[in-house]
Amino acid sequence: MKIKHFEVEDLRLKRTKKYVRVIELAPDGLLTRDAVIKYTGSDVERDVLKLVAVESEKGSGDIGLGFVKGVGLTKGAVAQSLSIEPGLIIGVGKSDEDLASAVRRVAQLGGGIVVVAGGMIMAELKLPLEVKRSENAAELAAEKTRVLAESAAGLGCRLAAPFAVLAFLTAAPIPQLRLTEKGLFDPVKQKIVDLFE
């Protein structure tokens, strides 16, 4: 796992227009729709959070930025290397600082899932999972995943399967909008689309 060093400022958007495209989650979280809303940045009142996709295979420095509606986080961030599209770290969060911390920690682990709030790691899982001979791998993975899910829920996440939903937000073939390291991808149009409208 290799990411190019980035600053928190690299996650900040320069507003170019009044409206922004948002990936709006369906209730099951797998399908999405393309919504356009007035740009206010991350906005927990409207359940709109920053979404990032950081290239993590070649160290190119490519970072896709977007917004997602329907996750429910009211603070903190979640980042993971589990992604349908390989070579990405996907993250969602309220603040750019927590997003940067979570993404960097996933890279330091060499892959995994990290939950961060206020710059502090609340829970993490290194992947692949390292298991001692005396441990049951399935039980250990289930316990660590439960702790991660509880940590995310403690930050307001209301998704039943938050890590699966995050993984699928990079799946370019599934409609309607997805995020890649190059930006928002529209599977119907088969191209990167502008974030701002």
Image: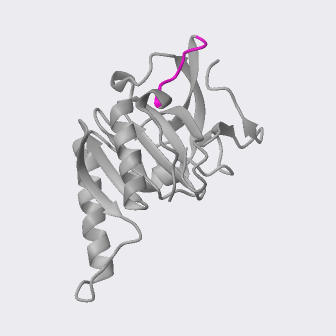
Magenta stretch contains residue 13: yes
Residue lying furthest bottom in this view? Answer: 133
Q: Write the residue at 44% across / 21% down.
A: 41
Q: x, y (%) of residue 4?
A: 52, 45
Up-down relation of residue 39 to residue 50 (above or below): above
Up-down relation of residue 149 to residue 62 (above or below): below
Residue lying furthest top in this view? Answer: 18
Using residue 130 as the reference point, say whether residue 164 is left or right of it: right
**Residue 49, quarter of picture:** top left
Using residue 27 as the reference point, say whether residue 117 is left or right of it: left
Residue situated in front as seen by the camera: 171 or 90: 90
**Residue 96, quarter of picture:** top left
Q: How many marks?
A: 0
Magenta span dominant secondary structure? loop
Using residue 180 as the reference point, say whether residue 91 is left or right of it: left
Up-down relation of residue 70 to residue 29 (above or below): above
Q: Provide the residue span drawn in magenta.
A: 11-17
**Residue 32, quarter of picture:** top right
Magenta stretch contains residue 191: no
Q: Write the residue at 33% across / 52% down.
A: 114
Q: x, y (%) of residue 188?
A: 75, 41
Q: x, y (%) of residue 106?
A: 39, 54
Asked if one can make out residue 116 in the rendered structure from this viewpoint, the answer is yes
